[in-house]
Amino acid sequence: MILTDQEILDNMKKGFIKIEPFNPSSLGTNSYDVHLGKTLGVYVDSVLDSKKHNKIEVFNIPDDGIVLTPENFYLGVTMEYTETLRHVPFLEGKSSVGRLGIDIHATAGKGDVGFCNFWTLEISVKKPVRVYQGMPIGQLIYFEIKGEIITPYNTKSSAKYNDKKPIPVESMMWKNNF
């Protein structure tokens, strides 16, 4: 089941969902709109290696925006810090963003119960498009779970994305054993 606006608010009061900063006008009928943070990242190397730590270069989006191009892949970040302690958060693109040809995640739309962080966005575009810090970029949808959680994400020793950073975070695939 997906939480409604009232259920999101009730769970925020109980401390099970945290959104900072919270803006009531961003609360939808059954979602919460998140916004593009002030930084973007691009990988330094043109060829990425899944067994190596691929470094990114991070830069601020100017006040007059930045044009994203199809030949590049960008890592962005949400303005909002979130905590989800009893639900599964899903990050989806907004339809108005999709209609500009912007994809905000390649594969990682689902968060884990216990995810407490900013969301890194995996941004690609179909044609050149100017984006701005603070623009609505996606929406969080919260699903109820069934059963007890043995190990929430924020307590897992193997969790690769627990460092709280308001900047995009590169792939940590290299930390896996394969």
Image (spheres, helix red, strand yellow):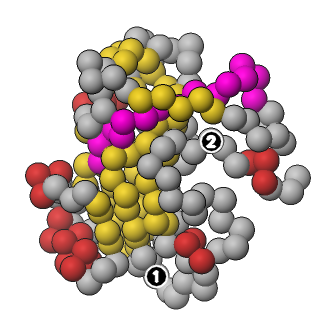
Quadrant where the N terminus is found in the figure: bottom left
Q: Residue at x 36, y 40 (%)?
A: 37
Query: Is 109 inside the magenta-drawn segment?
Result: no
Residue 171, image x and y in percent?
66, 44
Compared with residue 146, is residue 91 higher up or lower down, i.e. above or below?
above
Quadrant position of residue 144: bottom left
Name the residue located 65 percent from the left edge and 74 percent from the top edge: 156
Extreme left residue here?
A: 25
Q: Nearer the viewer, mark 1 or mark 2?
A: 2
**Residue 111 visible in rendering:** no
In the image, which disc is placed on residue 52?
none
Query: Does the rendering let one see residue 140?
Result: yes
Q: Give the image location of residue 155, x and y in percent.
A: 60, 77
- Residue at 49 percent across and 66 percent down: it is 115
Magenta residues, start to end:
34-48
Q: Say what amino acid the circle numbered 2 marks.
A: Glu
Q: Mark 1 or 2 closer to N-term? A: 1
Disc 2: CA contacts within 10 A as few (<14), some (14-19) or many (>=20): some
Instruction: Residue under label 2, please give it.
Output: 170
